[in-house]
Amino acid sequence: MEERVIGVNVSTIATTHLNYINGQWVRSLNEKVEASINPANKNEIVGYIQKSTKDDLDNAVKSAYQAKKSWKKIGQAERGQFLFKVANILEENLNDIAETMTREMGKTLPEAKGETARGVAILRYYAGEGMRKDGDVIPSSDKDALMFTKRTPVGVVGVITPWNFPVAIPIWKIAPALVYGNTVVFKPATEAAVTAAKVVDCFAKAGVPKGVLNFITGSGSVIGQQLIDHSFLDAITFTGSEGVGQVVANSAASRGIKFQLEMGGKNPVIVTKDADLDQAVEAVISGGFRSTGQKCTASSRVIIENQIYDTFIEKLVQATKKITVGDGLKEGIWMGPCASENQFNNVREYIELGKEEGATLIVGGETLSGEEYSKGFYITPTIFGNVKPEMRIAQEEIFGPVITLLRASDLTEAIEIANNTKYGLSASIFTSNISSLLEFIDEIDAGLVRINAESAGVELQAPFGGMKSSSSGSREQGETAKEFYTAIKTVFIKGN
Ligand code: NAP
Ligand code: MG
């Protein structure tokens, strides 16, 4: 899967990770490579990835196209068996892959291990799908006939993923795609492509037949764009920003192929006057700052009822000050750096914007420097108070360790504020009042509705996805994944 080369401009030896096409790790026709940098230490190159060409991409898609028929014929049960093997191999390599993830995009090692373990569980879940039903019998109005549905694969699926969950997101797309009989071309986020290459290697080692899973690296605007525009593609599944999601949707819609988009969020947490404030504080800290706030389900707006506003802030600030920031590989570190220089700069710009817009910077907002920090992209956990719903920091996804606090006079106003963005991914409420939680479940515009729990929790066996601009409307994970990765044939058989 890899070749040793001497890194450009550095004295260290780093590995170049190749493309995986038609069952082989192959060099790109382009010799240029790109360094993947450790955001905790920008002098460390985690590995190199190839800047692939249009011809490489063409080879990858053709290979998936050629494998389509035979993979479908293998049958669902046997396809599931392959996923069990992949799960075992991923589990054996959990520590190495998790460490690579931490080095490559900065989340702490315990979080990276948790995510990789989740990848293992997702693989086992979809491996089990191999033995579950692929259709329903429906009574026909003709008593002599048998009518049933049968699921059939969609074909060649393009998979494009972001850098923030470099193991779980690729797996929650690739595993169902494969078990339901599709072949895949996977283009990972450039920022996390080394981790992705290691995940693909688990599929390779499990003996998944050639052409069934193809992996190609390169920039989104070149390789990603060529992938979504490729005429052999039957479906495309994308997770990432809203802007790129639009591009994917336009391309897919213009050719009439299936597409699925999961995009940003500006997830609200409502804290009512009857909430358990300690429980709410813990959840807001976890939802807002874990993974350095770089989760699509991160808690980024906390809407607090007037009566408890000051008490809640006091507790929240106390807890925030205890957060340890540093290299996620080190023990005792709770929050790592921003995943890249680009993210770091974006977050800093939003912090400046918040001040300009007139919000009160209550805590954090600093860039850490000094010996331990100057090599990394560190920002302290940041909380803005007195935020108005129309401010850009309350409307736009920051994707960093920044929480905004807003006031509401009652639950109705709180829900109104919560719904007042273009996003609708996840939302939570802290309350002990049954009427309040019932109203929240009914009125909130979010695909994930969480009561007395942080906004950033996802279970692999349940549907996942958002409303409004957060999603194209379809759902991932659990049984619902089937809806995207299969088409239904309604079969009618009449005896003679
Ligand atoms: P991004 O910039 O949109 O990139 C996502 C992927 O699209 C990357 O693989 C990227 O490649 C590729 N890409 C870029 N331009 C493309 C084009 N023109 N055609 C095809 N592909 C293209 O997003 P990101 O910065 O990686 O991730 C952060 C975003 O993901 C946030 O908005 C976050 O909310 C969202 N997210 C959503 C969910 C969810 O399930 N709702 C989960 C996680 C993250 P390169 O890396 O090479 O640019
Ligand atoms: Mg990196």
Image (cartoon, rainbow, N blue to C red):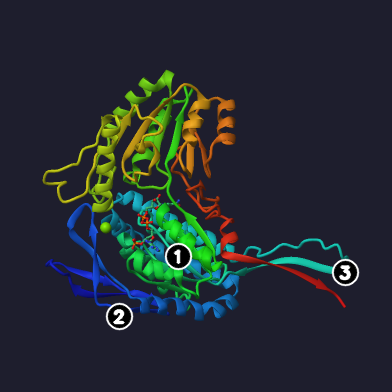
Most foreground residue, 289 or 410:
410
> Could you give the CA–CA distance between mark 2 and mark 1, rounded to whole angstroms?
22 Å
> Could you give the CA–CA distance between mark 3 and mark 1, rounded to whole angstroms?
44 Å
Q: Which mark is residue 159?
A: 1
Q: Quadrant of residue 22?
A: bottom left
The residue carrying mark 3 is: 144
Q: Quadrant of the N terminus?
A: bottom left
Classed neighbour count for the residue bearing mark 1: other residues with Cα under 10 Å, few (<14), some (14–19), many (≥20): many
Classed neighbour count for the residue bearing mark 2: other residues with Cα under 10 Å, few (<14), some (14–19), many (≥20): few
Q: Is residue 139 above or below residue 385?
A: below
Q: Name which residue lies at 38% across and 36% down.
A: 394
Is 255 left, or right, of 307 in this rendering? right
Q: Nearer the viewer, mark 3 or mark 1?
A: 1
Q: Which mark is residue 492?
A: none
Q: In which quarter of the image is ligand 2?
A: bottom left
Question: Looking at numbered disc 1 in the image, what kind of residue is underneath it?
Answer: Val
> Could you give the CA–CA distance between mark 2 and mark 3, rounded to whole angstroms?
60 Å
Mark 3 CB within 8 Å of ligand 1? no
The residue carrying mark 2 is: 29
Q: Is residue 156 above or below residue 351?
A: below
Question: Looking at numbered disc 3 in the image, what kind of residue is underneath it?
Answer: Asp
Q: Which residue lies furthest to the top in this view?
A: 307
Q: Position of residue 192 (x, y in %)?
A: 32, 60
Is 40 left, or right, of 27 in this rendering? left
Q: Which of marks 2 and 3 is in front?
A: 2
Q: Quadrant of residue 198?
A: bottom left
Q: Is residue 473 above or below residue 305?
A: below
